[in-house]
Amino acid sequence: MTDTSKDSTADHEYEKSILTAHAEGNIFNLSNAGNQLAPEALHGNHDLKTLRRSERIRQRRAQESEESRKERLQRDAARHRLHRLQESEQQTQERRRKGASRERQRREQETNEERHERQVEDASRARQRRGQETNEQRHERQVEDASRVRQRREQETNEQRYERQVEDASRARQQRQQETGEERRERQLKNASRERQRRQQETDEERRERQEKNASREKRRREQETDDEQLERQVKNAFRQRRRRQQSSSLYAAALRDEFPSESYHGRMDNICQHCNALHFKEECTSDRHDEFKQCCHYGSVQLPELLPYPDEIKTLLQGTDVESKHFRENIRSYNSALAFASMGAEIDLPQGFGPYCFRIHGQIYHRIGPLNPGPGQRAQFRQLYILDSSLALKERMGNAANENCNETTMSKLGDIMKRISPYAAAYKMMHEVEQEEIDRAKREKRAPPPLRMIFDINRGIHDRRLYNLPTANEVAAVFVGEDSEVPTYRHIAIHPRGQRWYPELEKTDQSRNRKRVSMLQFYSYRLAICPTFSAIQYGGKLFQQYIVDAYVKTEQNRLEFHRQNQKALRVELYQGLMDHLANEAETEGLRPGRVIILPSSFQGSPRAMQQNYQDATAIVR
């Protein structure tokens, strides 16, 4: 039986002897062996035996199967691993030095074709190895590679650094010439993202140093450029400036020529904001920020928490194509009114005709919120239905004439969902339970039941539980038992938690600017931005239009309140002549003048804004 381990060891030793013999030129010609001295003859005989053994090994390996070759390689690898584990640090360094020397000699002797073939094989092996490594291994490898590169660059001379930079620039130029348009765009986006992240993390001193280096490089580049290069650079800059100006003044030029475009196509909405993933058209992007937008998140300064997970049952109704889903979307405003906690009041004026649905109102929007229990002879409605049993609440909702087009099964399903997930339904239920407890306690003690108050969004820093003695509370409301004087005066009504609604103290993520709080307009712009993910607001259909109108009215009222409270900041004393005129007119008519609120021209829709727009229009068509 053949000892394969000894054969493989012998194979390794014989191949090593052959390589050594070839490298040192000690393979003798057999015809001249007799003319040599005895020691040299013995050495020649040894080389002859080595050649014969290596030939036998080559023949044996040529005849072995793929399975046998794989087993032999595995045995050799295991033996080498064991040998390397037993060697000392000095032996390891010596082995690596010899291996590097042999590899260097081999690479110096290889042809261009062999070098290219070796590089392709090395790249393939590295690709396979990297495809199998974990994230932790990848991070460890990148750290080690960066450390080796840093050490190598610290030890290189100026000449070596210049040669490396020239080779890197040459390779980068070749790669860019071979890449496609899509690969170029992807590379530019990655480079811009890395540069943006690097600039966000740098300090003021590092930013100033970077700007000085960039200015120095640009100055040297311009000093070294020829007249033709200077002319080409100036032409490119002028073309970019002209194109930017044409884009900003295209509407003005069209008005001057009295021309109307045949069509208006802005391309696909496939430009993604890097901060909030909102979709935009290409024209919405500014010239200096390619993947940042102002319309959605104000260049990343507005970051709101994600909305709570939407129930799958309602998501199916909003996206489904069956009869129940279509019926739900057709009567979605009726379902919303039946399940709302407060009633919405407005002068709704829907356009007549056969056009698409349009939600239009006149005047102001107001929301009514009443007591917990209905009055004598009145039916329970809105928030009063959430203290009833599910079957009774369904009966009351379906008995309302405004809900005659609603499906009873869908209404029951939505009512159960609201009771299950809404904290406000639990708050009204909690108040009803506290009321019953107080009534029962008053009967036992033979006294009148005390009044109850439910306050939404209790501020824990202001309302001390030891002072006000909150007997029952949940995450959005607390019920107070006692007289009016015992109820805290600082309160909010129906302020939603978890960032679902806007509130004045909502702050931006970027605190480096003057305005550190999120305005109501920025809040609704963020919520209404089109994103690839599911948005129940945008799937609302008719209810979506109602939501937008309600948001617009609230935003407009918020702006009016700002101008009312900041008349001094707007320098309205410049309009003192107008105020004197109004005072004189009121005195002549025998009237008592009220407080005059001046709306500047920056407020869209104000008389000064309309007059300014009129003057601009007349200047264009003049």
Image (tube, rainbow, N blue to C red):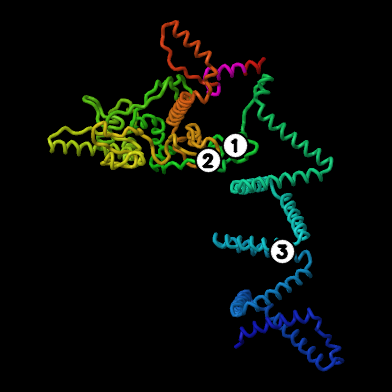
Quick one: label 2 or label 3, which is nearer the N terminus?
Answer: 3
Q: Position of residue 61 (x, y in %)?
A: 68, 79
Q: Is residue 614 magenta?
A: yes
Q: Which residue is mark 3?
A: 155
Quick one: label 2 or label 1, which is nearer the N terminus?
Answer: 1
Q: Residue at x 47, y 28 (%)?
A: 555
Identify the secondary structure beneath mark 3. Answer: helix
Q: Residue at x 75, y 66 (%)?
A: 114
User: Quick one: which residue is furthest to the top in this view?
Assistant: 588
Residue type at mark 3 is Gln
Q: Which residues are magenta?
A: 601-615
Q: Which residue is mark 2?
A: 511
Q: Residues within 10 Å of mark 1 (few under 14, many from 20)?
A: few
Q: Is residue 311 visible?
A: yes
Q: Position of residue 240 (x, y in %)?
A: 72, 35
Nearer to me, 571 or 447:
571
